[in-house]
Amino acid sequence: MKIETKMVKTIMDNQSFYLEDFLRVKDAVSKSKAIYKGQPVPYLYIPKIYDEKDVETFKSALSGMMDVIERTIGLYKAEESVRRLFGFEEKLEELILLPHDYEVTVPMGRFDIFYYGPGDYKFCELNADGASAMNEEKELSAIISENAIVNTFESKYDFKVFELFHTWVNALGDIYSSFTQTRGIKLKSKADTVIAIVDFIDKSSSIEFEVFKEAFIEQGYQCIIVDPRNIETVDGKMFSDGIVIDVVYRRLVTKDLMDRYDEIPAFIQGLKAGETCVVGSVKTQIIHTKRFFEVLHTPEFRTYLSPGQLEFIDQHVPFTRPLIEGADFNDYVKSKDDLIIKPVDYYASKGVCAGMDYSEPEWAALLKEKMKEDFIIQSYCPLSLVDNVIYDKEGKLEPCSFKTITGLFVYNGEFAGTYVRAGLNAIISGLHEGYTMSSMVVTEK
């Protein structure tokens, strides 16, 4: 029996005790910095629990995907035919092809998977540009790790939460060191190194940025939060208010960058000059776009891949193709419950639709509408389920089974932690009545 299921049973056997603690936790979350779109994040009382075998699977999943990513990005740079498969506009392609001058190609990411157990998972999507939600995980885990049900089980288990801020500071420091080595320049001391967290202020996660800023400063760096519209470039170097920027921690999503390209000429100039270390480079868009999975299943592209890479893709990446008019349309309608459509370049689950949420006529109409836009259609992956409790309308705790998706944070190419979302609908996200779960790793005492 899974630990979460044992926890549900324990709660239901002594509901009055745990209901009191549930309400205490609810109050604590409402007063915390676990904020999404200005409101406390919806959350679940019982954490998502993993063990060391799960962590080994996560590390293996990231290793396999990073191998495919490195190969893809290398091919994109080298082969015009591969670049055509992605179809990026000329201005974006120019930025992607710029050298980044450090070893890793995807410095920061959150790779979302449906996780079924050790060795068994499917990738949902890869978030590279502006990967976020570290603060939600931090704040919730600080509260949930002290709740009554975790305390009840601490006699049998050790619970560990992931640290996602200082580990990123260390990873970024290593990336910057790699950059200076490649460029043959002297690495500054931390006290003399200025790190700029860059995003459009009107689009950004301000609380999370402040927590990152604090972590950088605690480890001896100078750190500022900068809107790209306020960056100047002089002699190839980026500046903010006369202060030279040594490292850009780019939280600016590429879609937003390209949509507002003309608003940020000095920032674009700085990217092209290459004198400032930008973590991460715009080439991460190659894997951030939903088209990445489509390309991995394209016969032309697959000829470049090793048997091991092909086996990994076929086992762990859902079959994906462009949503275009063709002979497959009737099959798409009849197989609606096995399919999902996604816009190629949105984020936060905007525009994602699952066939099982529609009748056949509704699904057919939706497909025809979205064929006019830039969408992919994908095999709908089985969802992983977990037991938890929910606060019902009568003020009682009730057991409930939730669908979950596990985000794997990758820092400098390595597994750093998890971010778990849960829901009752076919699509799991804040836009679809989703919940955030604290995640913990347990070991038996």
Image (tube, rainbow, N blue to C red):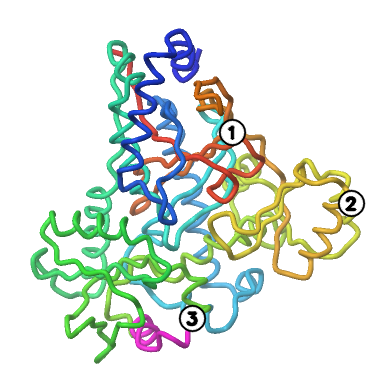
User: Disc 3 residue type?
Assistant: Arg
Badge 1 density bin: few <14, some 14–19, many ≥20, Cα 10 Å: many
Q: CA distance from mark 2 to mark 3?
A: 38 Å
Counting from the top left corner in percent of width and height, residue 22 is at 39, 25
Q: Earlier in the sequence, mark 2 or mark 3?
A: 3
Q: Secondary structure at mark 2?
A: helix
The overriding secondary structure of the stretch rendered in magenta is: helix
Q: Residue at x 33, y 21 (%)?
A: 150
- Please identify the quarter of the rendering in which residue 265 is found: bottom left
Q: Are marks 1 and 3 in contact (CB under 8 Å)?
A: no
Please determine whether, in this image, residue 418 is positioned above or below residue 363.
above
- Please identify the quarter of the rendering in which residue 291 is found: bottom right
Counting from the top left corner in percent of width and height, residue 300 is at 70, 62
Residue linked to disc 1: 403
Residue linked to disc 3: 260
Residue linked to disc 2: 361
Q: CA distance from mark 2 to mark 1?
A: 27 Å
Q: Secondary structure at mark 1?
A: strand
Q: Mark 2 or mark 3: which is in front?
A: 2
Q: Residue at x 58, y 54 (%)?
A: 349
Magenta-colored span: 261-272
287 with respect to 224 (left or right)? right
Quadrant where the C terminus sits is top left
Is 270 included in the stretch rendered in magenta? yes
Q: Secondary structure at mark 3?
A: loop
Is 437 included in the stretch rendered in magenta? no
User: Disc 2 residue type?
Assistant: Pro
